[in-house]
């Protein structure tokens, strides 16, 4: 069984379930998939990683247009994000049992699958594919908030598409400079590394790149906001931890992120907007830890991600 699951990225389990959900008219069956698919992905991750008997598993290798891709990489860093994303997917599925929305059910599965797929991507092209799916699938969760959310959804989509363009440009420049597509430490030694840092920074809510969070999250549906609070920003934090650990400038960026949202939060009476600023504030602490780059700091970032997903999700509920 581990050999079977080791041939593809576990995010594809949820994406496949999302495609099936799109054609399921019976709500109860869609709700079953919302809970069962992330649970199956969690089982698959454990079977593959612990069945390999090593600290890192590389699988799903393929050659696409001359590029050697590794669509699956499981190690202790990605394992933490994979676990909490699967658990959050299960909890979100349970929380959303009352909502009879075909679009929400389908997009929740696709969005969760894209997040899981991104953290287990072993190369930059695979990461880019899941990165774009994160944007496309999540915007419909914003639009489920009603007509008032349409403009916010368009701004949200524009920000995330721009992030994807920067990521694609960055990986192209990086490949030309290094002849490597592996998603390992990237750094700022090449212009491609800087472009990808900006791409990740948009999703992570860097100062002046953060407005999409407070714009879109409060306007989404109740279930949609809970789902949105988990994956995009935390996937970006994972990418920063993977590619830019020890990059000093992140300490200063993170420090600014921890401070400025507090002032905006105290000026708001909309609780969901206050929580959105609080989310931005917590992301700042994570970015600071990544900038420090020590094993202890990165362990703290991983622990903070797990706790933040749980407590912020509960607050949004």
Image (cartoon, rainbow, N blue to C red):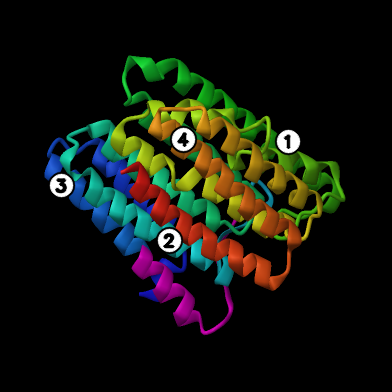
Reading the chain from its start, which is encountered first: label 4 or label 1? 1
Residue 3 visible from this viewpoint: no
User: Spatial distance from mark 4 to mark 3, Cα to Cα?
Assistant: 35 Å
Reading the chain from its start, which is encountered first: label 4 or label 2? 2
Quadrant holding the C terminus: top left
- Residue 59 percent coordinates (x, y): 54, 67
User: Spatial distance from mark 4 to mark 2, Cα to Cα?
Assistant: 24 Å
Residue highlighted by disc 3: 29
Residue highlighted by disc 1: 169
Quick check: 206 left or right of 61? right
Q: Which segment did they paint magenta?
A: 42-64
Asked if the stretch drawn in magenta spans residue 269, the answer is no
Quick check: 90 left or right of 214? left
Reading the chain from its start, which is encountered first: label 4 or label 3? 3
Q: Is residue 126 above or below residue 213?
A: below
Circle 4 — which element? Answer: helix
Q: Is residue 184 above or below residue 161?
A: below
Residue highlighted by disc 4: 274
Assess whether mark 2 and mark 4 are in contact (beta carbons under 8 angstroms). Answer: no
Q: Nearer the viewer, residue 148 or 153?
A: 148
Assess whether mark 2 and mark 3 are in contact (beta carbons under 8 angstroms). Answer: no
Quick check: 215 left or right of 165? left
Residue highlighted by disc 2: 84
| Residue drawn at (56%, 41%) of the image | 280
Assess whether mark 1 and mark 3 are in contact (beta carbons under 8 angstroms). Answer: no
Assess whether mark 1 and mark 2 are in contact (beta carbons under 8 angstroms). Answer: no
- Residue 223 percent coordinates (x, y): 30, 38
Other-residue count near label 1 (Cα within 10 Å), few / some / many at <14 / 14–19 / ≥20 = some
Circle 3 — which element? Answer: helix
Looking at the image, is mark 4 or mark 3 nearer the viewer?
A: 4
């Amino acid at each position: 069984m581990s050999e079977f699951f080791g041939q593809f990225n576990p995010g594809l389990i949820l994406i496949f379930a999302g495609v099936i959900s799109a054609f399921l008219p019976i709500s109860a069956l869609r709700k079953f998939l919302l809970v069962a698919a992330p649970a199956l992905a969690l089982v698959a991750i454990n079977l593959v990683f612990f069945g390999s008997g090593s600290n890192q598993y590389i699988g799903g290798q393929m050659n696409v247009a001359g590029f050697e891709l590794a669509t699956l990489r499981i190690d202790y860093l990605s394992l933490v994000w994979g676990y909490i994303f699967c658990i959050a997917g299960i909890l979100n599925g349970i929380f959303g049992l009352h909502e009879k929305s075909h679009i929400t059910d389908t997009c929740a599965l696709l969005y969760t699958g894209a997040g899981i797929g991104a953290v287990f991507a072993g190369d930059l092209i695979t990461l880019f594919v899941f990165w774009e799916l994160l944007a496309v699938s999540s915007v419909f969760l914003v639009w489920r908030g009603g007509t008032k959310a349409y403009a916010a959804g368009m701004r949200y989509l524009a920000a995330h598409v721009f992030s994807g363009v920067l990521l694609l440009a960055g990986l192209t420049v990086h490949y030309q400079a290094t002849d490597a597509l592996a998603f390992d430490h990237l750094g700022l030694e090449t212009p491609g590394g800087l472009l990808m840092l900006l791409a990740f920074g948009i999703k992570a809510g860097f100062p002046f790149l953060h407005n999409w969070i407070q714009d879109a999250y409060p306007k989404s549906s109740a279930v949609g906001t809970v789902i949105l609070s988990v994956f995009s920003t935390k996937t970006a934090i994972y990418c920063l931890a993977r590619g830019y650990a020890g990059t000093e400038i992140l300490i200063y960026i993170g420090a600014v992120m921890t401070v400025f949202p507090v002032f905006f939060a105290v000026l708001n009476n909309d609780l969901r907007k206050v929580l959105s600023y609080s989310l931005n504030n917590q992301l700042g602490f994570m970015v600071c830890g990544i900038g420090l780059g020590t094993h202890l700091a990165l362990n703290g970032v991983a622990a903070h991600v797990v706790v933040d997903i749980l407590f912020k999700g509960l607050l949004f509920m």
